[in-house]
């Protein structure tokens, strides 16, 4: 038995090979489990532990605001590798649904109930939803299309947004961002008194 500088206990050389190199049995310094690794990788980036250092996704990446993670599990589909899936509570209706972690809050906002939710007469930040016009197709799904009016400082700009865009909670038609950016620019270069 020998010990490396990071206190990885190398037990013995095995007869197995990976990439044409012999594997070594090593005791994990974090949990004590014995695992096999190429000697040159012991203690380095890909050989730090037996795998116990890998954290579940919800500890390394928090769910977007409004989403409550119920559980996390792995799923293996035929012809593809294993992938993590979250079971999340819908922020609109409370129903549980499954989603890939990288899609949550970017392309997936609900269990599907929002696509048919009626926003008429509601405010989404500074946008007032006047009426429902029809439907708009995005990829394979159709979303309700609405006529909206920007109410930020009397702007009055008319917009046409679908439920996919309204779920992302836009601030305004863009006028708020432009005014804020201009104000910050002018404040930055204002002459001192």
Image: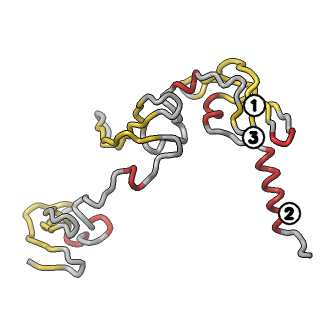
Disc 3 packing (10 Å; few <14; some 14–19; many ≥20):
many
Q: Nearer the viewer, residue 90 or 5?
A: 90
**Residue identified by numbered label 2:** 186
- Identify the mark at residue 137; answer none if there is no mark: none
**Residue identified by numbered label 1:** 128
- Answer with the quarter of the image where residue 30 lies: bottom left
Q: Quadrant of the C terminus?
A: bottom right
Give the CA distance from mark 3 to mark 2: 21 Å
Locate residue 193 relative to residue 42 in the image: left or right: right
Is the residue 100 above or below the residue 162 in the image? below
Q: Nearer the viewer, residue 107 or 190?
A: 190
Q: Position of residue 161 (x, y in %)?
A: 70, 30
Is the residue 33 above or below the residue 119 in the image? below
Q: Report the residue at 53% width, 31% height from top.
A: 92
Tell me the SS state at disc 2: helix
Q: Position of residue 125 (x, y in %)?
A: 71, 39
Q: Position of residue 121 (x, y in %)?
A: 72, 24
Tell me the SS state at disc 1: strand
Looking at the rendered image, the disc whose residue lies closer to the viewer, 2 or 1, is 1
Give the CA distance from mark 2 to mark 1: 30 Å
Q: Report the residue at 68% width, 40% height from top.
A: 170
Q: Position of residue 74 (x, y in %)?
A: 30, 41
Locate residue 162 relative to residue 63 in the image: left or right: right
Is the residue 100 above or below the residue 144 in the image? below
- Answer with the quarter of the image where residue 107 lies: top right
Q: Report the residue at 71% width, 32% height from top.
A: 123
Disc 2 packing (10 Å; few <14; some 14–19; many ≥20):
few
Disc 1 packing (10 Å; few <14; some 14–19; many ≥20):
many
């Amino acid at each position: 038995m020998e010990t490396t500088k990071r206190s990885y206990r190398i037990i013995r050389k095995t007869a197995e090979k990976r990439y044409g190199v012999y594997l070594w049995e090593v005791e994990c310094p974090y949990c004590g489990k014995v695992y096999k690794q190429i000697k040159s990788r012991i203690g380095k980036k890909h050989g730090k532990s037996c795998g116990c250092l890998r954290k579940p996704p919800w500890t390394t990446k928090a769910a977007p605001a409004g989403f409550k993670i119920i559980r996390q599990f792995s799923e293996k589909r035929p012809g593809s590798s294993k992938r993590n899936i979250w079971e999340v509570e819908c922020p609109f209706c409370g129903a549980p649904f499954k989603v890939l972690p990288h899609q949550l809050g970017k392309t997936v906002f609900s269990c599907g109930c929002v696509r048919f939710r009626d926003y008429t007469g509601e405010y989404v930040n500074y946008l007032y939803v006047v009426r429902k016009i029809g439907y708009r197709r995005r990829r394979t799904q159709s979303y309700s299309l609405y006529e909206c009016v920007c109410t930020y400082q009397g702007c009055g700009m008319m917009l046409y947004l679908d439920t996919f865009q309204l779920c992302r909670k836009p601030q305004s038609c863009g006028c708020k961002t432009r005014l804020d950016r201009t104000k910050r620019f002018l404040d930055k270069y204002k002459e001192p008194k």
